Image: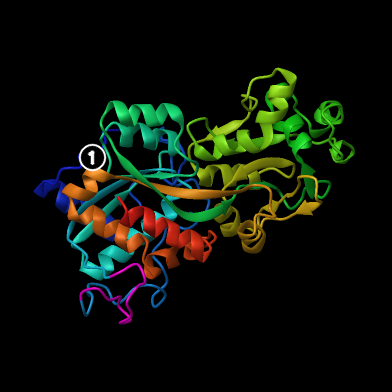
Amino acid sequence: MEIPSVNTSSIRRRALVAAVVGSLVLVACGDDDDGADTTAGAEEPATTMAEPGTTMSEPGTTMSEPGTTVDGTTPPSGSIELAGGDVFVTGSSTVEPISIRVGELALELTGGDLAAVVEGPGTGDGFETFCGGGADISDASRPIDEEEMALCADNGVEYVEIEVAIDGLTVATSPANEAITCLDIPALYALVGPESEGFANWSDAADLATEVGSAYAGDFPDASLDISGPGEESGTYDTFVEFVVADLAEERGADEATRADYSSSPNDNLIVEGIEGSDSSLGWVGFAYYQAEAERMKAIEIDAGDGCVAPTPETIADVSYPFSRSLYIYVSKASAADNPAVASFVDLYLSDQGLATVADAGYVDLPAERIEASRAAWEGR
């Protein structure tokens, strides 16, 4: 797919506004972009317009006073005077629902003058586009890596890293899978790691789980092991490897990667469908995608040595849930300097109104000191 130019043209302008007003969801909420079908039945979490009266004013209204929000208050990050124009955001499908909501808010506050196109091909694919100069902002469910830093440097793309939310990578199964309620990291390694290739049943992984020190190998049922998860371009995939695979793989001389023989998808909704579609499933998604389908999925508690902990807003926020992680946006300094709409979009993102979309999208708010650190990073650009 051809990435839209960051430069504005009248044709693109009309297309942007029409598309964003429609719902702002221009690309599937997948974490990797391979053109997968996005209408496959699972409810799309965190991608619809906010409920009337939550964070937005009446459609088509603008700020009553420059530097104030629609309720008349002044956000602590300073006055916000939103410029019109177009913004292109790419990257993580985990962060995508937040950026979509900020884009909706921008439309509401400017009467359609500030239009953001938001897509979610995946953190890795997003950085490839962003570091090539093809996007204003890159959403990311992990920090930028060294190769991506080098690509940005080679192309003269300077950026600001801004933490915007906290997520809990959620390992899940079907509620029908009564045998599994909690797993430790060795158990997950035995089920999904590089040495589990070919295991078709949960019980096939029991010996390996025991060998690598799991306390839960005896819980593995004699049932089909149906795994659904993101692909390798996904930041959620990278984070899972970091949390579950990397240390044990290094100790055992194995590849720092998951097994290849599972159902990977660029579309988080299809991963959710896979988890829901088998009584003995196993998969992993961002917390918002789990929350949106919590009646049809069961979050597996994680034991990292201090007992079993379920992902909740509270355990994710205080990091007692072992798979808590930060979510980011990366902003091109050149785009922010050359296009007032980009700077306005980020100003709005970091305002109280903008940050209110984090919980609305199903994620966890940053504590106050980290919000201030993010605002300081942006103001100090």
Q: In x, y percent, where is residue 334?
A: 22, 43
| Residue in the picture at 26% in, 28% down | 155
User: Is 201 situated above or below 321?
Assistant: above
The crowding category of the residue bearing disc 1, from other C-alpha atoms within 10 Å (few below 14, some 14 to 19, many at least 20), is few
**SS assignment at label 1:** loop
Residue 18 seen in render: no
Residue 150 or residue 91, whichever sits in front: 150
- Residue 69 falls inside the magenta stretch: yes
Left or right: 57 in relation to 204: left
Report which quarter residue 347 is drawn in: bottom left
Identity, as a three-letter code, of the amino acid under mark 1: Pro
- Residue 104 falls inside the magenta stretch: no
| Residue in the picture at 56% in, 53% down | 167
Q: Is the magenta region chiefly helix, strand or loop?
A: loop
- Give the magenta-colored segment's residue range: 66-78
Q: Which residue is mark 1?
A: 4
Residue 90 seen in render: yes
